[in-house]
Image: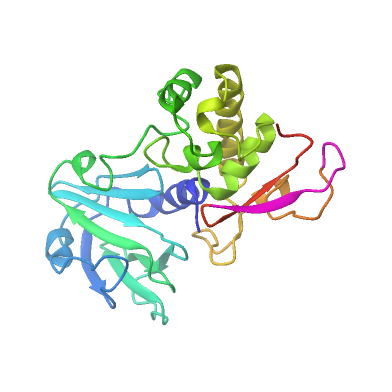
Amino acid sequence: MPELPEVETTLRGIEPHIKGHQIKDVVIRNKSLRWPIPASLKKNLSGQMLNEIKRRGKYLLFSTANGTTILHLGMSGSLRIVESGTPAEKHDHVDIVFENNKTLRFRDPRRFGCVLWTAKPVEKHKLISVMGPEPLSDGFTAEYLYQKSRSRKCTVKSYIMDSKTVTGVGNIYASEALFSAGIMPTRQAGRVSKKRYQLLVQSIQQVLKLAIEQGGTTLKDFTREDGQPGYFKQSLKVYDRAGQDCIECGNTIKQKTLNQRSTYYCSHCQQ
């Protein structure tokens, strides 16, 4: 699944081609995604100027004068900028066509992504309003994580992956950040000290910034908007390295399942 760095990479790739341009048409080939694409999307977007593109967690928000299109890549989705009129392939479900002869094309083989629209302030939308702070924002601090975690019995990995705690820290980057901070992913969130949360906040921010710089992690179903893969996978220290030697201590990287997600850790480096 594309995570925050991949979504941020996508935003930065598509923005120069379409921001400030008028939407000419919307083509919906398959409306049956995670939630049905609103039938009114074409009417609401046609003729509108795309004023701004933002990222909130793993959502991309496309703002026009009359509302906001909310797009999530799901497990296998990707966005491409193509020349208008480029023939669509099997899983190319939505085209947003611009007057500059560019088309934003949404491809999603598994159809777990979404394309929604709201005329209300987007921060009040039910998918957006429940989100915690952005991990790279000033609101994401050790004090915040520590205070919110008191009495929480879930694992610290599940805690930081909960979008109500902090938005956008997915499985790959949670594993990497916990390793960097030296925290065992199975430790109860409520039993992590403020000092260790300080290390964790720093680690989350560092690993996300590095991944964004390197263009996102290459996953089976994801490549960047220009068709080139990200390079962060070369920097992974524990994720998907079960049975290999820890790069820090030489012990074997282990794997277990937490909340139906594969979790990777070093039992020597993480406590």
- Horizontally, is 6 left or right of 71 in the view? right
Q: Residue at x 28, y 78 (%)?
A: 29
- Tell me residue 125's x, y (percent): 20, 45
Q: Which residue is drawn at 34% across and 74% down?
A: 93
- Tell me residue 107's x, y (percent): 41, 70
- Horizontally, is 224 left or right of 45 in the view? right
Q: How many numbered tags mark residues here? A: 0
Residue 33 seen in render = yes
- Tell me residue 210's x, y (percent): 62, 38
State which quarter of the image contains the C terminus.
top right
**Is residue 95 placed above or below 118 in the rendered structure?**
below
Q: Which colour scheme is used?
A: rainbow
Start-end of magenta stretch: 247-258
Residue 231 seen in render = no
**Is residue 79 placed above or below 239 in the rendered structure?**
below
- Tell me residue 236's x, y (percent): 70, 47
Picture quadrant of residue 77: bottom left
Q: Nearer the viewer, residue 175 or 227?
A: 175
**Is residue 70 placed above or below 196 in the rendered structure?**
below
**Is residue 22 placed above or below 185 in the rendered structure?**
below
Asked whether residue 264 is drawn in magenta, I would say: no
Picture quadrant of residue 257: bottom right
**Residue extending furthest right?**
250
Q: Which residue is drawn at 55% across and 18% down?
A: 194
Asked whether residue 255 is drawn in magenta, I would say: yes
Q: Residue at x 74, y 54 (%)?
A: 241
- Horizontally, is 9 left or right of 200 in the view? left
